[in-house]
Amino acid sequence: DLHKEYRRQRQMCIRDRLTDASALADLRYARDYYAARRLALADALQARGVDCRAEDGLFVWVPVRQEAAALSYLSSHGIEGSPGSRCNAGHAALAPHIRLAVTGLPENADFVATVADVVQQACVATAELD
């Protein structure tokens, strides 16, 4: 049946990509590339006294008092983020936080510093709303 053949072909392609030396080198490069971006932003935030989590992946997680207000502040300064509450996966007790993707973050220390400054200001501004 056509569906079975499609699944078999797809599985073979995935297997080939997961065992191909060139593909694995590409994955290692991407892992290191995005880790450097993530850590640059995390270091800049922490240097400004902003608590954040950036252990792995493509995001930096920043606790805030009010997600919507923090995201609005970032947006008004041309910085995009997303509400961390959408990513709690059943952990409703987690404190409000925002998620900042590093995929579009350029390798430019001045730009990273500007983003960190604005995130720090958003944290301060939303804390003052309480």
Image: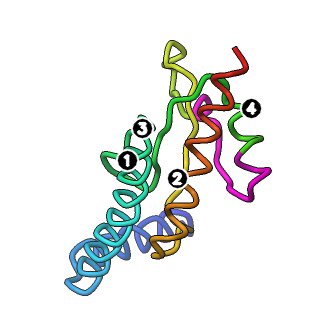
100 horizontally vs 30: left or right: right
Label 4 Cα crowd, 10 Å radius (few <14 / some 14-19 / many 20+): some
Residue 33, given in percent of the width and then of the height, sits at: 35, 72
Q: Quadrant of residue 15?
A: bottom left
Seen from the viewer's position, the closer of residues 91 and 49 is 49
Disc 2 crowd rating (10 Å Cα; few below 14, some 14-19, many 20+) is: many
| Mark 2, residue position | 116
Mark toward the start of the polypeptide (4 vs 3): 3
Answer left or right for 66 relative to 97.
right
Contact, CB < 8 Å: mark 1 with mark 2?
Answer: yes
Marked residue nearer the N-terminal end (2 or 4): 4
Q: Are marks 1 and 3 in contact (CB under 8 Å)?
A: yes
Label 1 sits on what residue type? Answer: Ala
- Element type at mark 1: helix
Q: Residue at x 30, y 45 (%)?
A: 55
Q: Is residue 39 magenta?
A: no
Would you place residue 53 above or below residue 22 in this image? above
Question: How far is disc 1 from disc 4 in space, using C-alphas?
Answer: 23 Å
**Residue identified by numbered label 1:** 47
Q: Which residue is identified by label 4?
A: 69
Q: CA distance from mark 1 to mark 2?
A: 9 Å
| Secondary structure of the residue carrying numbered label 2 | helix
